[in-house]
Amino acid sequence: MFMDLQLLFSDAQAITATAGSTNSVDMQVAAPDLGTGQDLYVWCSVSTVLAGDGDSTMDCSLQWDGDTAFGSANATRQEFGSFADTSAAGTTLVAKVQPGYPTERYLRAYYLVADGNYTTGNVDCGLVETIQKWKAYPNSAKSIIDS
């Protein structure tokens, strides 16, 4: 998975309560044709364990708005997953950005913490064109080449 710094919403951003990402993307400058003709994915990964009171959860979504203050952002968003309390470092969410979105100029990630705040936790989040699909499997007893 290749990441572009201009498409990075959060870089080890501390999350203890509901918050917007530290970075937003100006779609007219950084990515005017973002996703045209191909799928686009949003990913969010825990970089430091999310720990709270045992019931805490964090819903992740994309928000877009016509201004950088995101004053009306709650009206337009795409939810893409949740993290449970005690989500370990490396836990990752990936979702395809819905076709036709975003519909306004500025785009950011939004983290909605529910059922109590976290005491610790950091996340990384951004947009990518391809996702990491590689998975390690245990070695077989005998490989095909050896037979």
Image (cartoon, grey):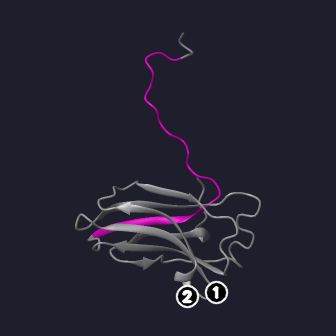
| Residue ID at (42%, 79%) | 19
Q: Magenta: predominant secondary structure element? A: loop
| Residue ID at (29%, 74%) | 117
Q: Quadrant of residue 90?
A: bottom left
**Residue 116 vertical placement versus 66 (above, below):** above
Question: What are the residue bounds of the magenta stretch?
Answer: 120-143
Is there a contact, CB below 8 Å, between mark 1 and mark 2?
yes
Residue 66's label in the rendered image is: 1
Q: Is residue 31 magenta?
A: no
Name the front one of labels 1 and 2.
2
**How many marks can you see?**
2
Q: Kindly identify which residue carries mark 2.
A: 72
Could you tell me the amino acid type at mark 2? Ser
The kind of secondary structure element at disc 2 is loop
Could you tell me the amino acid type at mark 1? Gly
Residue 123 spot, x, y in % from top left: 42, 65
| Residue ID at (47%, 15%) | 142
Q: Is residue 130 left or right of residue 135?
A: right
The kind of secondary structure element at disc 1 is loop
Q: Is residue 41 left or right of residue 115?
A: right
Residue 1 spot, x, y in % from top left: 58, 52
Quarter of the image that includes the C terminus:
top right
